[in-house]
Amino acid sequence: MALLEVRNVSKVYRTQSAPVAALRNVSLTVDCGEFVALVGKSGGGKSTLLNLCGAMDFPTAGEVLIDGQATSNLSDAALTRLRRERVGFIFQSFQLLHTLTAVENVELPLLLARTPNARTIARERLYRVEMEEYADRFPHQLSGGQQQRVAIARALVHDPKLLLADEPTGNLDTATGETVLALLTRAAHDFEVALIMATHSNENVALADRVLQLRDGRLEHTAVLR
Amino acid sequence: MNSGWLLFERLILRPLLREPVRTALTVFAVALGVGVVIAIDLAGQAAAGSFHSSLESLTGKDDLLISNTGGIDQNLLGRLVQLPYAFRFSPRIEKFAFLNGKGEALPFIGLDLISSDAQDEIRPGALSHAADLLTTGDPVWVGSRLGLHKGDHVRLLINDALHDFTVAGVLKPQNGEIGEENVIVADIGLAQKATGKTGKLDSIGVRVPPGQTLGFWTDYLRKQLPSSLSVEPQGARTEENRKMLAAFRWNLRILSYIALVVGAFLIYNTISISVVRRRNEIGIVRALGADRRLITFAFLAEALFFGVVGSAIGLVIGRAMAVGAVGLIGNTVQALYVSSQPAPIEFTALGVLTAVGLGLAVSLLAALAPAFEASRVAPVEAMARGREEYVAAVRSRVMVAWAIILLAVGAGLTNLPPVHRQPIFAYIAVLFLIAGTSAIIPSVVALFAGTASSLLERLIGVEALLAMRSLRGSIGRTSILTAALAIAVAMTASVGIMVGSFRETVSLWMNDQLRADLYLRPAGLSAIDQHPTMSLEIAEQIAKLPGVSAVDRFRAYPITYQGLPATLAGTDTTFETSASTKFLPGENRDQILRRLSAGDYAVVSEPFANKHNVHTGSVLTLPLARAERRFTVLGVYYDYAAESGYIVVDWNTLMRYLPDPEVSNLAVYVKPSEDITAVRRQIDGIIGGRAVLVFSNATLRAGAIATFDRTFRITYALEAVAVIVAVMGIAGALLAMVIDRRREFALLRFLGAAKPQIRRIILCEAGLLGLLANGIGLLLGTALSLILIFVINKQSFGWTIQFHWPVPLLLAALTGIYLATVLAGLYPGQTAVRMNPIEVIHEE
Ligand SMILES: Nc1ncnc2c1ncn2[C@@H]1O[C@H](COP(=O)(O)OP(=O)(O)OP(=O)(O)O)[C@@H](O)[C@H]1O
Ligand SMILES: [Mg+2]
């Protein structure tokens, strides 16, 4: 069974003026451990698709199945549980809580899920992203690249099966972006996590197993690189 | 359109209207603060206004009033009319009566209705053809509020007897005058008969001839009359009552300002949030050419908006609350000071201006600091990314130093004496303590967050950690909210402790003082300034009962001493029955009691001593029985019955000067071997048809405590309002916090937080704020209660109160406040949960 199945999904946003069709009849499957790059012009629907895959939002038509469970049928509590267990998010602007230290940021998902030994696991993840020595620093004491590494550790802390990254290198310079990306792909590989990454960068695309192109909400082109 | 207005509308008004709930909360907090001040002012005014004696509004034209302790001999009138000037005299009887022996005390007034003078003195129409009607059976004229009609029969309780009268007419209310709508008027002869004052008058109104000043005529009459008679301008008594009530009203007023002070903190908080949120905007406007003054004005205008709208609504709320407050204040006044009739509530221009002025001033003052901070935002900050955190420069060391100075000065101020009998310095000390505590709060918050964080995290979970971090992260905001709530809590706690201590003191005092088994007094509501009497035989016959070991007679007269009302009383000071009286430390009770009956000696109650600066050894000069009498004070005793105070002499001393043996109260001591119920039955037999009430010791005490509790209801109401204002402020601030931290809450949803968890974080913050505020408030409140008990109370009322923790009351109050604070987090919590995390993260 595929880890993620998107079946004939459409997403329409209601706005004050005309409704916006952000996704039109999109279908795709992602297997465990796969690295899928999402590309396409700005406004193409990449973020929208990621949110649907992470069970943060519901499709207007069609369905999204994570581990065989259709998100549309689940209660808020069940969706929360699904996210806690299966999904990790990485954002363009890092989104660390500035009142928490690095290690506290990383352990946050475990604490929210009331998992024991949170601190030990969090330190281990920081070690994986080579940030263990910065564990007790606050976000404003870290560089952008370091912050994003902490965010990666956080996204992996609860052993998710699906990692959703929305332009993770978008706020970083090219060199730092490359390091962070390398780290991200390696970590995804080590933890056997499927990674779906929206990106504008060609370097990022090159590392992916598959590239999906979204244009005006339609899946235009699928390239299998490996 | 004016460009200033446009800027105000766009930069200030529009953002406020975008958060209607929060804006409404702030406006309402100001409105409640202003409303309470107005309500207390209006209600206090109404309560004081009702002392306008009914006579003044009935016969308003008299210039002077002649009166005498124990009444004026009617024959004096005959001498007066022989004076070689064209005076007009109107004799009066003034008493209180109870309709059917129940309900409120109604002024019962006797006037000379037959003399033609009186005829035109009294309003035309109201008492027309009075003389004709005097021939019908015992006619009275009644105020319109009593709901009686011409021809009705009324039964009135006067002293210890019921009398039947016929309503001869209803007095029409006249151009808003107060006081006469529940009065009962009778002809002087009938009034003398009904009140048992045959041959006596309570007072004589005097209208002076033209051509000389009132002062001249006052001196002239004083020279002509025995020195025991007082000649005062009409209305002097009203003035005395007002003076007597001044301290009470001041204390109420000060209490009513607390809600406003709490409101000030909330305005400060609201404006600070505005400034912080709009730093970026301020930078842009500055870069576009706005000068600093404009920025300052813009934020002061925001405060003014809250002040104006809040005060306007406050006027309406205040008027409505005044209705309830009049009842509560009326209760207190009646129980502690003087029989009063609530007057209509009337807005005075001055009262309205004061309240609205206070509302505006408080709003503007509170906004000064943040508005000034806004003006210092440099134009370059337009380039900076908008920082949403609440950055308050908290220089905690400097603040702690300030706190210590403020607290020390405050403590020092409590040692200063009162100014014109007002504990001005003590009030200032309270302000200093509040300021000092507020200054120390940031350090306390930091300390608390540092030490309690891990413990709470273990107890409650990650929600507590996040809540704690956020409180600490925005320490300025947290401190202000904590301070606002802590002040409300402190006031509640301090007044609670004060009232609880007072109650305990009174109750202990009653245990000592009330040793008799049965107490008798005339029926009708009891009041401090009325001393209806019982027939002489009652006392005489009870004393003869075989089961009775002793009877204490007590006779009281309302007097004026140094321009303030007081009570002169005579009582049996036998050693057995008076041995329970407690004198101030260092005074020898046995010796005092032995000497008291030996001559012109007196003891005075503590409030009297403090008010008039009287000590053991002082000599009091009292005009009694045609001459000035001098009484040497032998001692000062503890008393909590009347704030106006007592001068007590021995029964025989009193009889020497005022030989009227009727008693106001009786205390009956039953022999230990005898059954109290049996004796009581015998006493009931002696009373017969007379309206006299008999109380057992326990009932009397219970009644006194019930009166006490009624008296302090108004203070509880005032504190409740301050707490409501604080809790509304917390709700508003939490709402702002939720909006400012929406990114965090959205992110938590991405990281796997369930909706209830988000809600719990906000409830946690509310709970932590409540915990801090309750803790600090209780400490501050204890300190303030010491000032209230030992300085303010002592200086304004003259009572010695023992400190006592009213634990159940405090527990209930603090728990209530705590729950209210946590509940204040519910709506903000709901708001946080309703936000769409995707949209919020997308905003970035
Ligand atoms: N909450 C919303 N309400 C209305 N329209 C929306 C909303 N979110 C996204 N859209 C619209 O849906 C479309 C797809 O947006 P989406 O954010 O998925 O694009 P994207 O591919 O991620 O773009 P970018 O590369 O710029 O991040 C856009 O036209 C956008 O305007
Ligand atoms: Mg996007």
Image (cartoon, coloured by chain):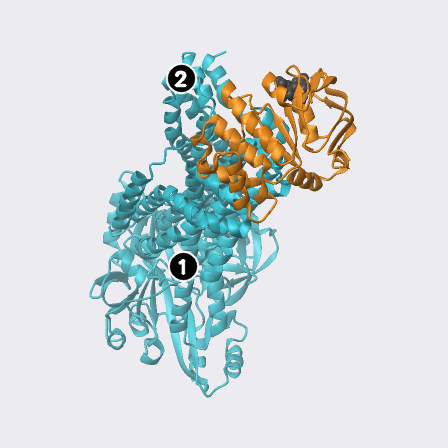
Chain colours: A orange, B cyan
Q: Measured along the vertical axis of the image, is residue A149 above or below residue B640?
A: above
Q: Which of B466 and B546 lies nearest the eye of the viewer?
A: B466
Q: Is residue B647 left or right of residue A79?
A: left
Is any atom of residue B132 visible in this view?
no
**Which of marks 2 and 1 precedes in the sequence?**
2
1 and 2 marks on the same chain? yes
Q: Residues within 10 Å of mark 2 (few under 14, many from 20)?
A: few
Q: Which residue is mark 1?
A: B529
Query: Mark 2 falls within which chain?
Result: B
> Which one is closest to the eye, mark 1 or mark 2?
2
Q: Quadrant of residue B505?
A: bottom left
Coordinates of residue B79 in the picture (x, y in percent): 30, 56
Q: Is mark 2 within 8 Å of ligand 1?
A: no
Labels 1 and 2 touching (C-beta < 8 A): no
Q: Measured along the vertical axis of the image, is residue A39 above or below residue B532?
A: above
**Label annotation for residue B380:** 2
Name the residue type under label 2: Val
Q: Secondary structure at mark 1?
A: loop
Q: Is mark 1 within 8 Å of ligand 1?
A: no
Query: Mark 1 falls within which chain?
Result: B
Image quarter where the C terminus of chain A lies is top right
Count of labels shown?
2
Q: Measured along the vertical axis of the image, is residue B176 above or below residue B708?
A: above
Is any atom of residue B390 visible in this view?
yes
Name the residue type under label 1: Asp
Q: Residue at x 35, y 50 (%)?
A: B247
Image quarter where the N terminus of chain A lies is top right
Coordinates of residue B135 in the picture (x, y in percent): 54, 57
Q: Residue at x 78, y 30 (%)?
A: A63
**Residue furthest out toward the front:** A226
